């Protein structure tokens, strides 16, 4: 499979990635449920984020700059945002240009599974959220590369779609053959290339093989993506109710018996000391 196909799709839909028709209709995760996924993801990013605002951060597969913008708002000013798609990088530049800052933000076109643009042990904090590791065709190499460019003892955070959550989506869409293949291969096909959907145990194996100690395993969300969209939208209109729902998620999202059925799997690792 040619990675240029992946790049072409993201270039094509770059302007609509966050709000338009990018995601296939078989996805049943509502915007409201995704907002909980974002909040849970951010909570754990903050938990492991270095306090020193001068640290060098890599946002790998950073897309339109959503996470980089949040880091800038906190005062972090040494951020590299990389992506395979030039179109997505252009969207990130537009987004972050609106932020009044003199911060040092670099935009680098790079394949997450072969980040030859970066030397080893360069970054103090490394993360890749949502699609990049799933879509890169070589998730095991992506984890190795994210580890390689991180400094020893620094944190590496990866998230992707879970395997078991995808199975009922495919069955609901009448794609029983695809559901069976996903369970045996960890691969689904939403586009013209394989998307890897993993269990936390499978991702943990990749972490350990790359030289990462698994620190935390998170589901984002573990409950809200199973609630009907119209019900969740009504509930979250009340700020107090939404906070209660978010607390439910944060209280239970590290329960490993729930994580494999969550909307997203997020794993936090720490790079082992070099021998």
Image (cartoon, rainbow, N blue to C red):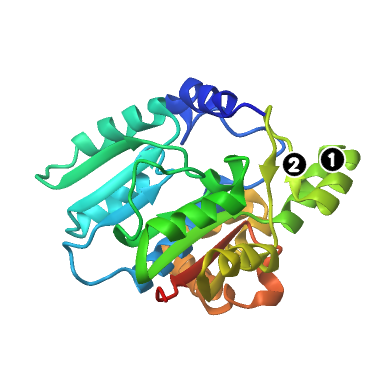
* Observer-nearest of 42 and 202: 202
**Considering the numbered disc 1 on the image, is that residue within a helix, a strand or a loop?**
helix
Give the spatial CA distance, label 2 vs label 1: 7 Å
x, y percent for residue 129: 47, 52
User: Residue 116, relative to residue 247: is it above or below?
Assistant: above
Residue 188's mark?
2
Q: Are marks 2 and 1 in contact (CB under 8 Å)?
A: yes
Q: In the figure, is residue 151 to the left or right of 172? A: left
Residue at image point 65% right, 62% down: 262
Q: Alpha-carbon neighbours of circle 2 within 10 Å: few (<14), some, or many (≥20)?
A: many
x, y percent for residue 169: 76, 46
Q: Could you tell me if residue 16 is visible in this image?
A: yes
Lower sequence index among marks 2 and 1: 1
**Considering the numbered disc 2 on the image, is that residue within a helix, a strand or a loop?**
strand
* Residue 95 picture quarter: top left
Q: Could you tell me if residue 223 is visible in this image?
A: no
Residue at image point 57% right, 29% down: 3
Count of numbered labels shown in the rendering:
2
x, y percent for residue 256: 66, 76
């Amino acid at each position: 499979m040619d990675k240029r196909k992946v790049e072409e799709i993201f270039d094509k839909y770059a302007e609509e990635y966050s709000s338009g028709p990018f995601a296939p209709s078989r996805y049943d995760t509502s915007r409201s449920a995704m907002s909980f996924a974002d909040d849970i993801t951010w909570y754990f990013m903050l938990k492991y984020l270095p306090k020193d605002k001068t640290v060098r951060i890599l946002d790998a597969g950073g897309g339109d700059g959503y996470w980089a913008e949040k880091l800038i708002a906190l005062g972090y000013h040494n951020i590299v945002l990389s992506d395979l798609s030039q179109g997505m990088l252009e969207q990130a530049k537009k987004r972050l240009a609106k932020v009044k800052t003199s911060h040092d933000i670099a935009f680098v076109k790079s394949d997450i599974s072969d980040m030859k643009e970066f030397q080893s042990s360069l970054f103090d904090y490394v993360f890749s959220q949502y699609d990049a590791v799933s879509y890169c065709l070589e998730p095991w190499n992506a984890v190795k590369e994210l580890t390689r460019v991180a400094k020893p003892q620094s944190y590496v955070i990866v998230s992707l779609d879970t395997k078991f959550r995808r199975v009922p989506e495919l069955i609901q869409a009448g794609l029983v053959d695809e559901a069976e293949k996903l369970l045996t291969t960890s691969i689904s096909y939403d586009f013209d290339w394989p998307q890897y959907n993993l269990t936390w145990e499978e991702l943990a194996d990749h972490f350990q093989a790359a030289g990462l100690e698994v620190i935390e395993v998170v589901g984002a969300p573990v409950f809200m993506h199973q609630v009907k969209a119209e019900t969740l939208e009504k509930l979250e209109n009340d700020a107090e109710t939404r906070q209660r729902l978010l607390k439910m998620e944060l209280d239970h999202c590290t329960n490993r018996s729930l994580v494999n059925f969550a909307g997203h799997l997020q794993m936090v690792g720490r790079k082992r000391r070099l021998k």
